[in-house]
Every structure is written in structure tokens, then in C-alpha cells.
């Protein structure tokens, strides 16, 4: 929610500034207003790209699947994380020989890792524990991809192609980061209710911008 308010407030302030300046400096005022409109359109365009990535064709095979974590609530899975876990469980049932990496550390200091919570949920719902690998050190999506790739290779798995299991609004950035570590990314997304989807997509615009800046200056 905070990212939405930051965006709306910033655009509103720029627009108001333009109207305040316009009576004395018409040209400058219109420039400021134009910048606010351009920024709003650019933001909407970015959000539309990140809104949802199509799932890969079922015929495409990955070396392993990667289930990405998201924040816990009092050490428990949130509804968003449960949706991701259910999507991963469906994949495991449809691919009885596939391996799944669950990735997520404890970035907020709750005393339990996202990976442990996801693995426990999957086991409790019938998943074969021998097919689940835990990557419990990552604190962000970039580390999710890099650390899970390293873990898969340590376990003797091929790692050229990864099936990313996450929320639809998160897929584009996750696939981008997979490419940054040299992987081909396939996608399998869970669906998010409208309001959380909107709020999360607004946040993703800022996250994606940050990833691009880090890549440009690394």
C-alpha cells in the first residue's frame, strides 16, 4: 500500500506545483504538468508489462522447478504464499520425477525461514520430501535465483533451464534475474486477487527499476 501512496502523492505534488507555477511562468508550468503526465503514463506502461507474464507451454521441460517465497506473517504462510505452494504442489503431482527447490530465508527476523515454511506446507499436503531441496539463505529475488542455481548444481542437477513458480506480477522480474545468472526461465504462475495484485504490481515497478539500475552500475 505504501508504494501506491508514494506514487500517487508524488504525481499529485508535481501536478499541483505545475499549476502553482503556471500563472507567473506559463511555459514552465506547462512543462512541469507535462512531466507529471509523462511520468504517470510511463508508470502505467511499466505496470502493464509487469502485470502478468504468460505461463510456459506444458510441453517445455525444465531441469528443476523453483518455488519463490514471500513474506511470512507471524512465522506462518500468508495466503499469497499458500497460493504459490499450491501451484508448486500441482506441478509436482503432474511431474512425478521433477525436483523442486524452495527458496527463501528469514529477511525480517521471524525465527523461521520461508523455505522451511514452504517445505512443511508441501509435506503436509502430500508432497514427497525427497523431491524438495531447501535454499534458506536468500533475502531477495536476485539471491533466490543465484543461490538456488548453485544448490541445484551441488545436488547434481542440470541448471540451464528453470521453471519459476511464483505470483504472476512477480514473474517478469524473476525471469529477468534468471537470465542475469545465465538461465533460461520458464514460468508457472499462481493468480492473485485484484486488490493485492494492483498493490504488488505498483511495488514491482520500483523493484524492477532498482534491478535495472543495479545491473547498469554493477
Image (tube, rainbow, N blue to C red):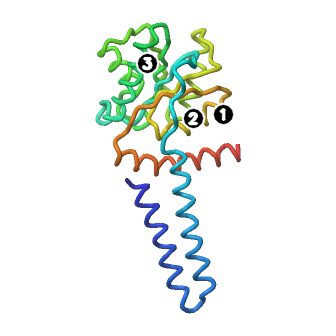
Q: Which mark is residue 180?
A: 1
Determine whether label 3 and label 1 are within 8 Å by CB: no
Q: Which mark is residue 91?
A: 3
Which residue position holds label 2?
A: 142
* Mark closest to the chain's N terminus, 3 or 2: 3
Q: Real-space Cα distance between discs 3 and 1?
A: 25 Å
Disc 2: CA contacts within 10 A as few (<14), some (14-19) or many (>=20): some
Which residue reaches farthest right? 217
* Mark closest to the chain's N terminus, 2 or 1: 2
**Where in the figure is residue 34, as x and y percent of width and height?**
58, 73
**Where in the figure is residue 198, as x and y percent of width and height?**
40, 49
**Where in the figure is residue 8, as x and y percent of width and height?**
44, 64
Q: Real-space Cα distance between discs 2 and 1?
A: 9 Å
Q: Could you tell me which residue is drawn at 56 percent across and 64 percent down?
A: 39
Quarter of the figure that contains the C terminus:
top right
* Mark closest to the chain's N terminus, 3 or 1: 3
Q: Could you tell me which residue is drawn at 52 percent across and 45 percent down?
A: 50
Q: Is residue 152 above or below residue 71?
A: above
Determine whether label 2 and label 1 are within 8 Å by CB: yes
Disc 3: CA contacts within 10 A as few (<14), some (14-19) or many (>=20): some
Q: Could you tell me which residue is drawn at 55 percent across and 86 percent down?
A: 22
Q: Real-space Cα distance between discs 3 and 2?
A: 23 Å
In this rendered view, identify the residue nearer to me: 43 or 107.
Answer: 43
Amino acid at each position: 500500500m505504501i508504494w501506491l501512496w508514494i506514487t500517487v502523492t508524488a504525481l499529485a505534488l508535481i501536478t499541483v506545483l505545475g499549476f502553482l507555477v503556471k500563472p507567473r511562468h506559463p511555459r514552465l508550468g506547462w512543462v512541469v504538468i507535462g512531466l507529471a503526465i509523462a511520468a504517470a503514463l510511463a508508470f502505467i506502461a511499466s505496470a502493464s508489462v509487469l502485470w502478468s507474464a504468460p505461463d510456459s507451454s506444458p510441453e517445455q521441460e525444465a531441469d528443476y522447478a523453483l518455488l519463490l517465497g514471500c513474506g511470512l506473517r507471524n512465522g506462518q504462510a500468508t495466503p499469497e504464499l499458500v497460493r504459490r505452494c499450491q501451484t508448486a504442489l500441482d506441478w509436482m503431482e503432474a511431474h512425478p520425477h521433477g525436483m523442486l527447490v524452495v527458496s527463501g530465508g528469514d529477511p525480517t527476523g521471524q525465527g523461521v525461514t520461508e523455505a522451511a515454511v514452504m517445505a512443511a506446507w508441501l509435506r503436509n499436503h502430500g508432497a514427497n520430501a525427497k523431491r524438495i531441496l531447501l535454499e534458506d539463505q536468500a533475502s531477495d529475488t536476485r539471491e533466490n535465483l543465484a543461490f538456488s542455481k548453485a544448490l541445484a548444481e551441488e545436488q547434481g542437477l542440470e541448471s540451464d533451464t528453470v521453471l519459476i513458480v511464483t505470483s504472476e506480477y512477480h514473474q517478469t522480474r524473476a525471469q529477468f534475474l534468471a537470465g542475469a545468472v545465465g538461465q533460461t526461465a520458464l514460468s508457472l504462475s499462481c493468480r492473485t486477487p485484484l486488490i493485492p495484485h494492483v498493490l504488488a504490481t505498483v511495488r514491482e515497478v520500483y523493484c524492477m527499476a532498482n534491478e535495472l539500475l543495479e545491473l547498469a552500475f554493477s
